[in-house]
Amino acid sequence: MILDNLKPIQSRRNVLSDSVYEALCQEIIEGKLIPNERLREAQVAKALGVSRTPVREAFAKLEHQYLLRKDSSGAYFIQQWDRKTLDEVATLRSVLEGLAIRLACRNLSPDDFDTLQDIILQMDSAHQRDDYDKLIALDIEFHSTIWARCGHNLLRQVLDDMKAQILYFMYTTRPGDEKDYPTTHRELVEILRAGDQTRASETIQAHIHTTAERAMARLSGEADPGT
């Protein structure tokens, strides 16, 4: 197992277990720690320069996020997502985001639209550079901006908690529809400007479903359902 990308954690401003979680989560999401690879508490603790207690706590949180799995002996391994898990993440995200954008539609301010437009301009730039990692990060930033305006604290919390799973889905199924992000997000902004809550909800759910179906078809070697 290669842990060269993990560096000792210097900051003590946050709870250590959260810092360990964030470091490992990033490695898993970006594919630097591969599915079915074993993670050992002692090795991770040494790599990050922390005790085993925050590592153990981080492992438990990663297991809860379906990013780690624990076998009968108590050993932890990077989770290998199957088609069922990918479908569950996509369908749950679709329902939650459909509600979030419906609620946010009536709360978005001119400053919010400026923020969304700026993100799209950054998407244009990233697309020109073929920087798909940046496009994925900008996609999450775009959607998070909308979540923040939904006025529903519990819904926002659930979506924030799903960020790691959404990112893992996107990285697992790359290349996806990243090249279409500037266009699809512009269309969504125009719908939001018009204040059409129903169409906004339907559009974002359809986009998530279509993207997921195409991604899972590619992984399965099936014909693209959009062709």
Image (spheres, rainbow, N blue to C red):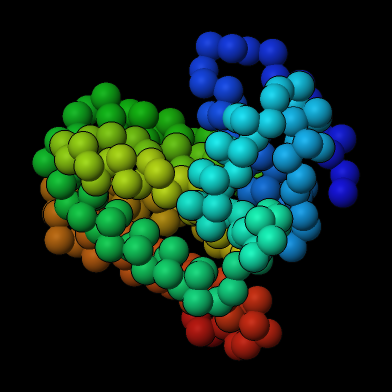
Q: Residue at x 48, y 52 (%)?
A: 64
- Residue at image point 55% right, 52% down: 63
Q: Nearer the viewer, residue 172 or 34?
A: 34
On screen, 150 above or below 172?
Answer: above
**Viewed as shown, does residue 14 lie left or right of 55?**
left
Residue 162 visible somewhere in the drawing? yes
Residue 32's x, y, as percent? Answer: 77, 47
Q: Nearer the viewer, residue 71 or 79?
A: 71
Q: Is residue 36 left or right of residue 186?
A: right
Residue found 59% across the figure and 74% down from its top: 82
Residue 149 found in image quarter: top left
Asked if one can make out residue 135 in the rendered structure from this viewpoint, the answer is no
What residue is drawn where x is 51% and y is 44%? 61
**How many dots with numbers?**
0
Residue 17, picture quadrant: top right
Q: Residue furthest bottom?
A: 223
Q: Nearer the viewer, residue 49 or 222?
A: 49
Q: Position of residue 69 (x, y in %)?
A: 61, 59
Given residues 87 and 176, the one toward you in this image is: 87
Residue 37 drawn above or below residue 195: below
**Residue 216 lies in what quarter of the image?**
bottom right
- Compared across the picture, whether 166 is left or right of 95 comes to right
Q: Is residue 90 above or below residue 110?
A: below
